[in-house]
Image (cartoon, rainbow, N blue to C red):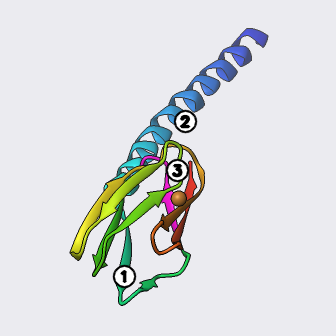
Amino acid sequence: MPSVSRLCISVLALAVLVAGCASSEPERSGASASWTAESVIVPVRIADGAVTPADARFEARVGQPIEIVVDSDTDDELHVHAEPDHTFAVTPGTGERFRFTVEVPGRVEIELHHAGHTVATLLVRE
Ligand SMILES: [Cu+2]
């Protein structure tokens, strides 16, 4: 009698283990596919010496593409304070796109160095 009940418990434990593995795997891959597909868009406008936005907040995930889209009437330099950092040369024009990813979680400031202006801060999560 004791041997039968021990067998029951081990079969039950095995069933739970198998069920746990099967249910957790498709969930994990589905979640990662949904957020890596889309990029975070940061629109920036420089016109007549005025810059918008002013320190706007954006949320992103590590490895998620981030695109800065710039409309500008002047030259400037975008500086992304990530680790490693990124520098992009802004030239007059509309719809200039600068794409990058952030690999270290934390706060990442995006500055325009000539205007001396922080346009956005990215909150990057793991
Ligand atoms: Cu800077």
Q: Quadrant of residue 121?
A: bottom right
Quadrant where the N terminus sits is top right
Q: How many labels does the image show?
A: 3
Q: Are the two marked residues, 1 and 2, in contact with CB atoms closer than 8 angstroms?
A: no
Instruction: Pick whichever of labels 2 and 3 is earlier in the sequence.
Output: 2
Residue 50: image x %, image y %? 43, 87
Instruction: Pick whichever of labels 1 and 2 is earlier in the sequence.
Output: 2
Identify the residue position indicated by label 1 in the image: 46
Residue 89: image x %, image y %? 32, 60
Callout 1: helix, strand or loop?
strand
Classify 10 Å Cα crowding around label 3: few (below 14), some (14-19), many (20 and above).
some
Q: Does the magenta stretch include residue 17?
A: no
Nearest the camera: 55 or 103? 55
Identify the residue position indicated by label 3 in the image: 82
Separation of disc 1 and disc 2 at Cα? 53 Å
Which residue sits furthest right? Answer: 2
Q: Note whether ligand 1 is within 8 Å of mark 2.
A: no
Q: Which residue is drawn at 50% across and 66% down?
A: 111
Nearest the camera: 124 or 86? 86
Magenta residues, as a range? 58-63
Residue 123: image x %, image y %? 57, 61
Identify the residue position indicated by label 2 in the image: 20
